[in-house]
Amino acid sequence: MTNPVTAPVSPARQLLSKVPEISVLFWLIKILSTGMGETFSDFLVNTFPPEVAVGGGVLLLSVSLWLQFRASRYQVWIYWTAVVMVSIVGTMVADIVDFVAGIPLPASTIAFSIAVASILAAWYRSERTLSVHSITTRRREAFYWATVMTTFALGTVAGDLTAATLHLGYLASAVLFGVAIAVPAVAHRWFGMGAVAAFWSAYVVTRPLGASITDWLASSHSDGLGLGTGWISLAVTIPMVAGIAVAARRERLRRNEI
């Protein structure tokens, strides 16, 4: 049975795809990017006027996605830059929904869950597949990034819901989501859950997992270590960039072998 965490794909098909092969390295970079996006978003909003921070984030996100769509194949640095910007802006959007619009976290969690389900349903109706290994057309790529952006917002509000509304705090939330992210892999391997469903279930959970960990490290709240959003963002960025560099090297070697 195929493992959705490290699902193999043929070299020819991967060469056409606009997204990376799913591997342990993919999940490590993804979790690091979610944590970095959470604390760096808070750092930007607290350092600069919110209008400037949000406007700059949206601009950079737009540029990164333009480069991603313009690329003819998967480009490691372009792809992960887009993911990082989605992480940062996704946090800002979730915070606007919570603090500016005043929408309660349970309501926003439900709303974003419906949004994710709706996008996936529309994607499947249009393409008859939700596999990330099939991102070889512009339309599928558009569905993919719409799903990614919405899952980041969902993960952010879900993490805030457990930490604040349910009063679990950041550390307990991190433990909760750490257990939750293993559920899809176990369900797929032992209970017949489909690989695509397992992938997207785990993908959603990476956001609150990474964000809860970095919030716990950075926050000065009662359950946080108070290390600061700036320093934690930098500390997470270093291994994330190193991981992306390893992924880029592996991609070059793989293409040379084809």
Image (cartoon, rainbow, N blue to C red):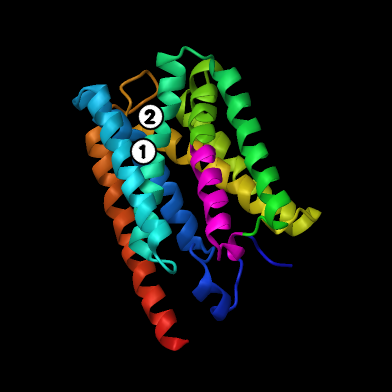
Q: Residue at x 61, y 38 (%)?
A: 116
Residue 164, placed above or below residue 217: above
Dot label at residue 23: none
Q: Nearer the viewer, residue 115 or 252?
A: 115
Whether residue 123 is in magenta: the answer is no
Q: Which residue is labeled 1 in the image?
A: 88
Q: What secondary structure is the stretch in magenta mostly built from?
A: helix
Q: Residue at x 41, y 21 (%)?
A: 96
Neighbour tally class for label 1: few under 14, some 14-19, many 20 plus, Cα within 10 Å: many
Residue 43 seen from this side: no
Whether residue 137 is in magenta: the answer is yes
Q: Residue furthest bottom?
A: 257
The reply to whether discs 2 and 1 touch (Cβ–Cβ < 8 Å) is yes
Q: Residue furthest left?
A: 48
Mark 1 is on which residue type? Ile
Q: Nearer the viewer, residue 120 or 189?
A: 120
Q: Residue at x 53, y 36 (%)?
A: 175
Q: Nearer the viewer, residue 71 or 86?
A: 71
Residue 62 placement: quadrant: top left
Q: Residue at x 77, y 56 (%)?
A: 190
- x and y percentages locating residue 59 in the rendered image: 30, 40
- x and y percentages locating residue 196 in the rendered image: 68, 55
Q: Which residue is labeled 2 in the image?
A: 92
- x and y percentages locating residue 241 in the rendered image: 30, 57
Which region is colored magenta? 132-152
Mark 2 is on which residue type? Met
- x and y percentages locating residue 140 in the rendered image: 58, 56
